Image (tube, rainbow, N blue to C red):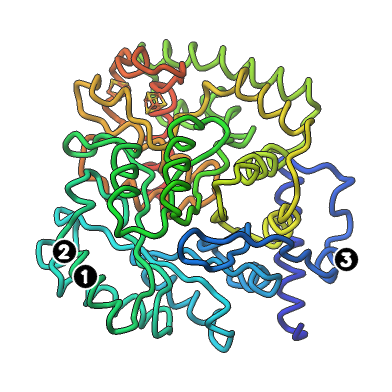
Amino acid sequence: MKKKEATNRRGFIKKSVTGLMGAGFLSREGFSHPEEAATQDFPKIKSFRTLGRTGFKVSDIGTGDFDDPGPFRALLDAGVNYIDTSESYGQHGRKIGEVIKGRDRSSLFITSKLRANSSIRNIGKSGISKEGFIRRTNRVLKALGTDYLDCLMISSPETVEMLRCEGFHAATAQLKKEGKIRFVGVSHHGSQWITQPRESMEKVLTAAARDGRFDVMLLAYNFLKEDMSERILQVCKQENIGTTLMKTNPVRTYKYFQEVLEKHRYSKSRKLTEQEKEGLRRYKKKVENAQDFIKRYNLKSDKQIRDAAILFVLSNPNVHTVCTTVLNFDDASAYLKLSGKKLEPRDRSILSAYKKECGSLYCRHACGICEPRCPNKVPVNTIMRYDHYFASQGREKHAMIKYAALKSARADKCQNCPGYCESACPYGVPVQALLSSAHETLSLKNRRG
Ligand code: SF4
Ligand code: SF4
């Protein structure tokens, strides 16, 4: 490792460890000597799985999104070879391009995603024509600094009809002929409502699996959201489709629970409405259960559950790789240690107890069951996903930008609502309080930012 890089890496680790200790998430027995942690060898990838009909052997731990190129580079050096990217990454694609430059391109499986919704800003009707998709793919290739993508995915098609977008399929046929893409895929973390009703992730992805033109899928799956995703994974196995996962960790930080409970996230800026106070009371009961659970299992960090959650999805033989978001070297090291590891009985029992006692604090990705009940057409699942980016993944700026760009009604509507969506939720999520809180977090910080 070059001297300057090693110094930066030490500084980065020191900062992140200090931050975690300050938040009370990491015991002092952890990295008591950050410099030592910085210089130790990183763990390596120990397991590869065949990505369905592509035949490519992908590392069980994959990656894509990151804040700092250092930890991302460390992952690739350790053997991670599945890289998930998106057209929406913009400048971020260039950062990825810089890290992959000079590596053996054939050892990497690089994907990118394009939306096929003409109502999205900057896409329009011309963007979803054959020529539009080709133009957008060429832009992605240029940013990444590569001649080809291993897989080009249609991103979050909201309906089966959108999945069959003629422009996308005509473009992928031509791009394959030109050697610019090798395989075609689809990604989905769905919501049923943004500006109009959508179809469920299961309906869209099952149709994709049966369609015959899709070789790889990227979908949401975790231990609190099993049934729908496991059915999709089963169909993928039958059709020999490669499967990659996102949203594998549904667990929020303990700090987040407390912040919402103590009303720090919104009571300081204004007086709460009566509906909010009532929503908060419902929420409080759920958080008290969660806190009992944390004490009982003597959990020092939410990362203990995050790691077990990743092992849980990897224990499903129909899964080929998981896409991780790497914020720092601690994350990179922790993810690598999971490669090839089995889910232990203690992990399984913690997850099962968490599901029973704290599962109602998680708004299931790609659910949206309650959305038709909202008189204001608030896209519950989409806003909760943005809040998940903020609170669980630490991607605060990304979450705020997404919320600012939302065209639909926002969660300020929830402040004066008794929570019709909440009574329609089969998982008992205290969603009215969570949405009110999400609105304050995502928009207040945006104004400050
Ligand atoms: S609140 Fe419940 S029903 Fe609504 S999207 Fe979330 S998990 Fe689904
Ligand atoms: S709390 Fe009310 S306004 Fe907000 S999403 Fe639920 S039903 Fe809609």
Q: Which comes before the other along the chain, label 1 or label 3?
A: 3
The image quadrant that residue 200 belongs to is: top left
Can I make out residue 24 in this image?
no
The image quadrant that residue 142 belongs to is: bottom left
> Which residue is the site of mark 1?
133
Horizontal side, residue 331 vs residue 159: left or right: right
**234 w.r.t. 295: above or below:** below
Q: Give the quarter the ligand 1 occupies.
A: top left
Residue 66 on image: x %, y %: 54, 63
Mark pair 2, 3: CA separation: 51 Å
**372 w.r.t. 317: above or below:** above
> Which residue is the site of mark 2?
128
Residue 36's disc number? 3
Residue 300 on image: x %, y %: 78, 35
* Circle 2/circle 1 CB separation < 8 Å: yes
Amino acid type of the residue tagged 1 in the rendering = Phe
Amino acid type of the residue tagged 2 in the rendering = Ile
| Disc number lying in front (2 or 3) | 2
The quadrant of the image that shows the N terminus is bottom right
Q: Which comes before the other along the chain, label 2 or label 3?
A: 3
Q: Helix, strand or loop at disc 3?
A: helix
Can I make out residue 371 in this image?
yes
Residue 239 on image: x %, y %: 41, 50
Q: Helix, strand or loop at disc 2?
A: loop
